[in-house]
Image: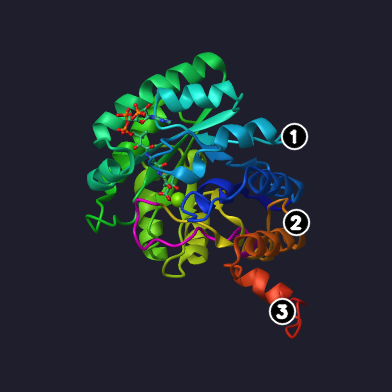
Amino acid sequence: MSDHVSIVEVGPRDGLQNEAQTVSVETKTALIEKLVAAGLKTVEAGAFVSPKWVPQMASSDAVLARIDRRQGVSYPVLTPNMKGYEGARAVQADTVAVFGAASESFSRKNINASIEESLERFRPVTEAAKADGVRVRGYVSCVLGCPYEGKVALADVARVVEALYAMGCYEISLGDTIGVGTARETRAMIRAVAGVVPVDALAGHFHDTYGQAVANVYAALEEGVRVFDSSVSGLGGCPYAPGASGNAATEDIVYMLEGSGFDTGVDLDALVEISLWISGALGRRPGSKATLARSARSISTARP
Ligand code: HMG
Ligand code: MG
């Protein structure tokens, strides 16, 4: 049996949060449902954050209320504090995510709190979620670099990962928020973090600013990580990470994984269709090499 790798599709949240044009509730809902139909079992569906800070996510409650939820699929949403958690609960979110950072400056810019303050805000969220039977995922941003501070010490990454795990997060997603890391740095970072929490509680979340996301996924795979976040068509960026590009494209990751002997349970052809559809809806060229290769009539789509 081949080794299974789980993909956490973050396109509807990370992919759209920085979009300047308003994306309708209908489009967001259709995007989530299409991704689930393509075989994705975890689709991050929105964020319960301040609409003044991230206007594009203001419709997350309407999206969550509208999606036709499938059994066996989870639809996590971001919840930076209790207000966010209450919003997520009101629409029966099954999984919430708290999001911290390994860099002080990024933490303050992104969520208006120091790292310590942020952990204090997450604590009641994790406690309430535990009491309600809601799963909590944790994110740590800037694990391979910060847009404001540059290099980030591995000890700082490990400290925040450990704190989130101790709070009860079932999985910690390690974010190369600005997509500056390389395979060697990824490997060192995973080793440092796997020294404080089990490697099977880790996920990789690589933005593709320097075109390193697929290589970084592979490096993390070699270190034993089996969960990766990605966004269809490589959509994405963070409003508080200037210059950062989208996430690793789900199509590219699925192509690499399946071609390397891993099983993802995701239908690549269906993903390519979704990528073309959402790119059309947003009026841009797909950000996935696999989608461009599969959809170019002049290029053979057959694998060698
Ligand atoms: P704040 O201003 O410090 O919060 O923001 P506050 O508690 O002082 O409240 C101020 C106002 O915000 C009040 O409203 C609150 O009600 C409201 P007012 O009285 O002024 O009308 N408020 C909220 N409204 C809706 N939902 C809430 C909420 N909380 C307070 N949950 C806060 C703190 C965290 C809310 C703010 O900084 C914020 O929303 N930041 C947005 C952060 C964000 O979404 N960033 C992008 C996602 S993170 C990311 O992309 C990285 C990731 O992909 C991993 C990676 O790549 O590394 C995850
Ligand atoms: Mg991100």
Q: How many marks?
A: 3
The three-letter code of the residue at mark 1 reads Arg
Residue 58 located left or right of residue 50? right
Res 61 → quadrant: top right
Q: Mark 1 sits on what residue? A: 70
- 177 lies above or below 101: below
Determine which of the numbered discs, if any, sits on residue 106 in the image: none
Q: Residue furthest top?
A: 131
Label 1 vs 3, first from the N-terminus: 1
Image quadrant for the C terminus?
bottom right
**Residue 134 visible somewhere in the drawing:** no
Highlighted range, magenta: 239-254
Between residue 215 and residue 207, name the one nearer to us. Answer: 207
Between residue 122 and residue 170, name the one nearer to us. Answer: 122
Pointers 3 and 2 in contact (C-beta within 8 Å): no
Between residue 76 and residue 49, name the one nearer to us. Answer: 49
Badge 2 density bin: few <14, some 14–19, many ≥20, Cα 10 Å: some
Determine which of the numbered discs, if any, sits on residue 296 in the image: 3
Q: In the rendering, at what x and y percent does residue 239 appear?
A: 39, 52
What secondary structure is marked by label 2? loop
Q: Residue furthest bottom?
A: 298
The span from disc 1 to disc 3 (Cα, nearest Å) is 33 Å
Q: Mark 2 sits on what residue? A: 267
Residue 39 located left or right of residue 222? right
